[in-house]
Image (cartoon, grey):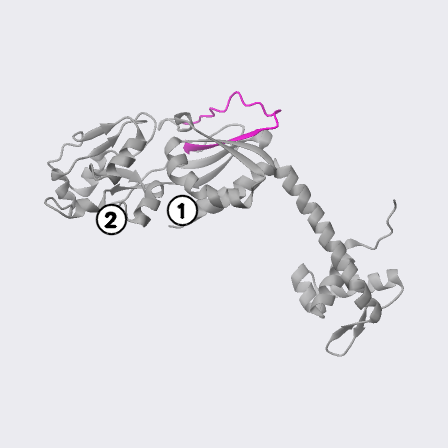
């Protein structure tokens, strides 16, 4: 079937002007000039062979033909918009595989996912955690993305911790974590209250040795030096080979730990952890969204990327 229709822009101009009864307000909504709106409507009237508006001195009013035409034009535009949106949702649907550093997944990303899954139920997220997404602190360029079959219907992207140099990929920096001492609020009181940094001489230091050779994160020796504390063995305390155990231990009051602030912000906000001192240590390595070029333009990737960058921007502003 062949449809004989006027230009779409003229129909949009008519609907907006009829709704506002103002060429000026319609032009502001459609981001064009009032003159452009006037010309589009004049052209539509010439195409139709009748007037759509009574042009009064300081106002507009619809003609009988304009009032009759408006509901159908509005319905047609709404159907057109719905058809486009339906196509976009279909294209963005499917499985999205995301591989991230373990701590980032468990302590940051998972807390933010409910908003995404509620807004995009058409996307199936498949999460994986791997220390291979963490660059060695002396790495100048690491890809680590070999073996991806971009011919599959599935799409895989990565969140990496490192310096941001990944050949053959589109890279967005999410945020640079800052580090601080954290502990259970119970340690601030009792027989050995933690009031000043030198009080650490009487507290248990917790060490995360799960990825010591990879992450360029502060050590106890560095923190104690910045704090001006002497007489504390930086290697003393309890050592863990799993970062999740360190997280559980510090919440339970086993000792004090140096933690990435974004990864403990929920526990701090809930009062399960506190940051008793204002000593902040920063690094240059950051979390990055890394997408292979071959899949970077897929709608499902764009949907997730837009959402993730918006969430990460809130961390960067703090």
Q: Residue furthest top?
A: 147
In the displayed structure, 39 sits above or below 2; it is below
Residue 47 relative to residue 40: left or right: right
Instruction: Specify the quadrant of the image occupied by residue 226.
Output: top left
Toward the viewer: 317 or 5?
5
State the mark number for residue 197.
none
Q: Residue at x 81, y 66 (%)?
A: 68
Q: Residue furthest bottom?
A: 57
- Give x and y (percent) for residue 216: 32, 32
In the displayed structure, 53 sits above or below 44; it is below
Segment colored magenta? 140-163
Instruction: Specify the quadrant of the image occupied by residue 28.
Output: bottom right
Q: Is residue 250 magenta?
A: no
State the mark number for residue 315.
1
Q: In this figure, which residue is indicated by the disc labeled 2?
A: 278
Q: Residues within 10 Å of mark 2 (few under 14, many from 20)?
A: few
- Give x and y (percent) for residue 151: 62, 24
């Amino acid at each position: 079937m062949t449809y004989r229709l006027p230009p779409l822009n003229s129909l949009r101009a008519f609907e907006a002007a009829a709704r506002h009864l103002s060429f000026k307000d319609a032009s502001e909504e459609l981001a064009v000039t009032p003159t452009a709106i006037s010309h589009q409507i004049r052209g539509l009237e010439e195409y139709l062979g009748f007037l759509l508006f009574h042009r009064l001195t300081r106002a507009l009013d619809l003609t009988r033909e304009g009032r009759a035409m408006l509901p159908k034009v509005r319905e047609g535009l709404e159907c057109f918009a719905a058809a486009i949106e339906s196509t976009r949702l279909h294209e963005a649907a499917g499985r999205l595989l995301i591989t991230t550093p373990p701590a980032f997944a468990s302590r940051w990303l998972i807390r933010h996912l409910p908003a995404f899954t509620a807004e995009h139920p058409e996307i199936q997220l498949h999460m994986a955690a791997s220390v291979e997404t963490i660059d060695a602190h002396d790495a100048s360029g690491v890809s680590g993305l070999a073996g991806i079959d971009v011919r599959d219907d599935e799409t895989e992207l990565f969140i990496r911790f490192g310096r941001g140099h990944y050949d053959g990929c589109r890279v967005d920096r999410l945020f640079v974590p800052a580090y601080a001492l954290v502990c259970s609020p119970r340690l601030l009181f009792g027989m050995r209250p933690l009031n000043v940094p030198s009080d650490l001489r009487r507290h248990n230091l917790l060490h995360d040795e799960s990825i010591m050779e990879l992450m360029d994160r502060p050590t106890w020796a560095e923190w104690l030096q910045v704090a001006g504390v002497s007489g504390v063995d930086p290697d003393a305390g309890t050592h863990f080979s799993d970062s999740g155990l360190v997280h559980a231990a510090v919440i339970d009051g086993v000792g004090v730990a140096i933690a990435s602030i974004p990864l403990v912000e929920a526990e701090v906000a809930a009062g399960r952890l506190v940051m008793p001192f204002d000593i902040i240590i920063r690094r240059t390595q950051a979390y990055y969204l890394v997408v292979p070029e071959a899949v970077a333009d897929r709608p499902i990737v764009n949907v997730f990327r837009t959402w993730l960058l918006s969430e990460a921007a809130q961390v960067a502003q703090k």
